[in-house]
Amino acid sequence: MSNVRQISVFIDNKPNQLAGVMRMMKESKINARALTVADTKDFGILRMIVNDTDKAVEKLKAASFAVAVTEIVAISIPDSPGQLSRVLDILGSRNVNIEYLYTFLGKSDRSVSFVIRVDDNENASEALTDGGIIQLTENDIAEM
């Protein structure tokens, strides 16, 4: 099973909060490789994969941000119609529930990469391997 850690940062839903986090990342020479932001009325959740997870968590906690780290599944598939549907069918056939997913730029313009948060990483990983889907490691993503 690939081991990719995602950082979730809880930020106030106010102007300049996301900019402050990204400024801190820049000053710490931490590169966000994939990210998404979800919001509620009062706060946002920044989810990201970075090139140095341990350092990012340390810096964010030192700046008093609420931070959580979760393991996710990351994949790379051909950039052509029907490929994501194929992945979803593979996971569904093993009763893997998808909590959320988001895309990010990969190494090639011929492929697309996804972060997938599922309810069972081990089952998902086995299903994807059996289905011939390329799974990315944290190192793969850091080097993109």
Image: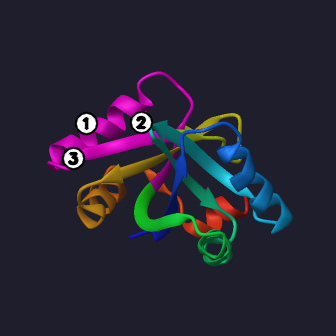
Q: Quadrant of residue 72?
A: bottom left
Horizontal and vertical percent for residue 143?
A: 73, 63
Q: Measuring 54% from the left and 36% from the top, which residue is drawn there?
A: 78
Tell whether label 1 touches label 3 (CB within 8 Å): no
31 sits left or right of 36 in the view? right
Q: Quadrant of residue 109?
A: top right
Quick one: SS at disc 2?
Answer: loop
Mark 1 — residue?
89
Horizontal and vertical percent for residue 106?
A: 66, 45
The answer for how far apart the CA atoms under marks 3 and 1 are is: 11 Å
How many marks do you count on the picture? Answer: 3
Q: Nearer the viewer, mark 2 or mark 3?
A: 2
Mark 2 — residue?
40
- The amino acid sitting under disc 3 is Asn
Tell whether label 2 touches label 1 (CB within 8 Å): no
Horizontal and vertical percent for residue 81?
A: 47, 21
**Which of pointers 1 and 2 lies earlier in the amino acid sequence?**
2
Quick one: SS at disc 3?
Answer: loop
Q: Measuring 63% from the left and 78% from the top, which residue is drawn there?
A: 58
In magenta segment, residue 89: yes
